[in-house]
Amino acid sequence: MKNEPDFTRKLINSFEKAAEQKVISKGQFLIKEGEVEKNLYFVMAGAIRVFYLSEFEEQTIRFGYEGSFINSLSSFLKGTPSEFYIQAIRKTTVKFISKEKLQELVNEDNQSQQQYIQLLEALVTQQIDREVDLMITSPVERLNRVLQRSPNLFQHIPLKYIASYLRMTPETLSRIRNS
């Protein structure tokens, strides 16, 4: 936590002090498509995935594990129905605060507002990195890019979900890892 920006530390402290806690079982949802996201979650233990359900398949777009903030961001920011599902991959403990409580934290002072903007900028940058990942045709290169950002991914997330995230079959991912 030493390298976290002040606002992130403040947010984590707020979660530790004032957030509600929820334990969700494997397979249980925090939010489903069509629901409006009203909370920001902090994963205390376990693992979560965010996915989009097309008519053909589930497409995993993001993971959250211990120490991660997660929600359906577009729904949260715009107050519109979510296009995504957020589901526990295994038994998971999250703490959460409402959008209103987050706004109170952001509006405490100018420094918090500036750091919140930096946090949002980091999220936008992560999204751009993700979009670049999807444009890369080489499965090996896609895997390497993701592992550079999240070197411990395989310790937290089952292979089948990582494969979905990388837009490849679990068999292809296994072959790449074993070569």
Image (cartoon, rainbow, N blue to C red):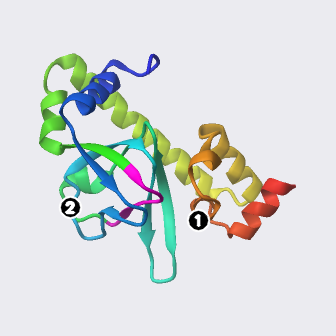
Foreground of the two, 118 or 92: 92
How many numbered badges does the structure rendering display? Answer: 2
Foreground of the two, 14 or 104: 14
Label 2 is placed on what type of residue? Val
Q: Is residue 59 above or below residue 115?
A: below
**Taking 41 as reference, is 136 left or right?**
right
Q: What residue is drawn where x is 27% and y is 25%?
A: 13
Q: Position of residue 168 (x, y in %)?
A: 67, 67
Q: Residue furthest bottom?
A: 55
Q: What residue is drawn where x is 31% and y is 29%?
A: 12
**Snapshot quadrant of residue 105:** top left
Spatial distance from mark 2 to mark 1, Cα to Cα?
Answer: 25 Å
Q: Quadrant of the N terminus?
A: top left
Label 1 is placed on what type of residue? Ser
**Taking 148 as reference, is 110 left or right?**
left
**Label 1's element?**
helix
Q: Is residue 12 above or below residue 5?
A: below
Sort mark 2 into few (<14), some (14-19) or many (20+) by Cα contacts within 10 Å.
Answer: some
